[in-house]
Amino acid sequence: MDLFTAISERRSIKHFNPSHQLNDAEVATLFEQALLSPTSYNIQHWRFVRITDNKLRQDIRAAAWDQAQVTDASELVLICADTNAWQKSPERYWRDAPQAAQDMLVPMLQDFYQGREWIQRDEAIRSGAMAAQTLMLAAKALGYDSCPMIGFDQDKVAELINLPDDHILVMMLPIGKALKAANGRGGQLPLQDVVLNNGF
Ligand SMILES: Cc1cc2nc3c(=O)[nH]c(=O)nc-3n(C[C@H](O)[C@H](O)[C@H](O)COP(=O)(O)O)c2cc1C
């Protein structure tokens, strides 16, 4: 599937075939592709929690207004992000780069995030969202569908997965075989309302 087709055919699907499973190679492909998403200073804040335990899936569904895709999709991925990733052994983000680049970038990234809590959080969300879109398009390319979700009790789900204090839940992503197509699109804003030339 070419990229433009994947972009236009990706829709948020609510009805998944509960008996379909992704095989291990497909799951590995999805995450390998997600890891190639861009992040500021290559910090890769994302942490992906796969929910494979049926009871935990049921508990998460209960915390997500009983939305069926939480239990019916083949995979349920909780896309989390570490807001403190910028200061946890940052040299690993540039370990394959030439020494001169490492010497410049590692202190630079620490200066950029040090003491700026709001941008530490923004960056974690940006990274998680980048990965989410890659996962959704990669799933589409493999013949699967997905549904990005933030409709759940964040505190409850955080408790269920033992989310560390310095991590955030970016979104939940069920992935699987669609049983029913999405409804028509809600309505995309016209280009002229959202594309601006040289400022507002
Ligand atoms: C961050 C985010 C959270 C969303 N949360 C939910 C959700 O909890 N439940 C749901 O059914 N759809 C959810 N959606 C899907 C949106 O309603 C959907 O993306 C939007 O209506 C556009 O439709 P499309 O994705 O089919 O193009 C969410 C989408 C995003 C990006």
Image (tube, rainbow, N blue to C red):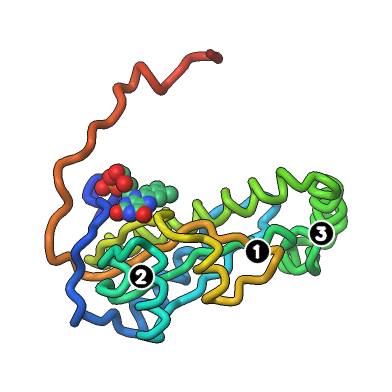
Foreground disc of the pair 3, 1: 1
Secondary element under disc 3, as helix, strand or loop, is helix
Depicted 23 relative to depicted 191: above or below = below
- What residue do we see at 20% from left, 68% from top? 16
Q: Is residue 53 left or right of residue 100?
A: left
- What residue do we see at 55% from left, 63% from top? 155
Residue position marked by numbered label 2 in the rendering: 61
Residue 167's label in the rendered image is: 1
Residue 130: percent from the left, percent from the top? 50, 52
Marked residue nearer the N-terminal end (1 or 2): 2
Secondary element under disc 1, as helix, strand or loop, is strand
Q: CA distance from mark 3 to mark 2?
A: 44 Å
Q: Is residue 180 left or right of residue 144?
A: left
- What residue do we see at 48% from left, 14% from top? 197
Residue 198: percent from the left, percent from the top? 54, 14
Secondary element under disc 2, as helix, strand or loop, is helix
Quarter of the image holding residue 150? bottom left
Note whether residue 4 is visible: no
Q: CA distance from mark 3 to mark 1?
A: 26 Å
Q: Residues within 10 Å of mark 2 (few under 14, many from 20)?
A: many
Residue position marked by numbered label 3 in the rendering: 102
- Residue occupying the far left of the picture: 180
Q: CA distance from mark 1 to mark 2?
A: 21 Å
Marked residue nearer the N-terminal end (3 or 1): 3
Note whether residue 170 is visible: yes
Residue 60: percent from the left, percent from the top? 41, 72
Residue 77: percent from the left, percent from the top? 43, 70
Toward the viewer: 102 or 69? Answer: 69
